[in-house]
Image: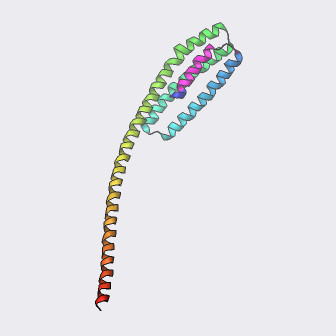
Amino acid sequence: RGTVHILAGRARDLYLLKDPEQIQDAIRDLETKTDDCREFINQLNGLADEKGLELISSFELKFNEFLKHTKRMQNLIAKNTDSTRALAYTVLYENALPPYRESIELMTKIVEKNRAELKAQSEESNALYSATQTSSFIVLSIGVILAIGISIWIIRSISSSINQAKVA
């Protein structure tokens, strides 16, 4: 989600630049951030269940739409004229921002879904830990009782042998 926010912020910042060299640097930075985001999406695809894949697929569609408009805006700004800047502004705010907002909503759903799953797994692991802890305590208690019982038996056995030896 953060990378998508960064992309939108960098696209907005790109609009404000006038220097051709800074514009090219900003475009390269946008491309790097886009690659980072695509890598993150690929990682999510590898981890997701069916519902997650459905959400990620929807996110990807909106994200790609956002990127298409952002790329168009980049091309317009690279021309660096007043008319192309005005058109880039329109592309940014009328075309790129709606799919950006929708992609953020979808990413939020993915995060909420993952949080719910993590919470359920955490509760399950806590219950398992509690059961294991109880079982371990019971086994340890039985071991201590057996050790004490065997110790008493050995001590009595030795004591009775010594007493028999004294009597004889």
Q: Position of residue 69 (x, y in %)?
A: 57, 19
Q: Position of residue 51 (x, y in %)?
A: 42, 36
Q: Residue furthest front?
A: 166
Question: Left or right: 117 with respect to 24?
Answer: left
Q: Quadrant of residue 105?
A: top left
Q: Quadrant of residue 123?
A: top left
- Depth check, front residue: 153 or 12: 153
Counting every numbered tag in the picture gives 0
Residue at 55% from the left image edge and 28% from the top image edge = 3
Q: Position of residue 91 (x, y in %)?
A: 56, 14
Residue at 46% from the left image edge and 39% from the top image edge = 48
Q: In this rendering, is residue 49 above or below 96?
A: below
Q: Quadrant of residue 27?
A: top right
Q: Position of residue 41 (x, y in %)?
A: 53, 34
Residue at 50% from the left image edge and 28% from the top image edge = 1
* Quarter of the image that includes the C terminus: bottom left
Question: Left or right: 140 with respect to 54?
Answer: left
- Depth check, front residue: 117 or 64: 117
User: What is the span of residues highlighted in magenta in the rendered image?
Assistant: 4-19
Residue 10 part of the magenta-drawn span: yes
Residue at 63% from the left image edge and 29% from the top image edge = 32
Question: Left or right: 119 with respect to 43?
Answer: left
Q: In this rendering, is residue 132 above or below 116?
A: below
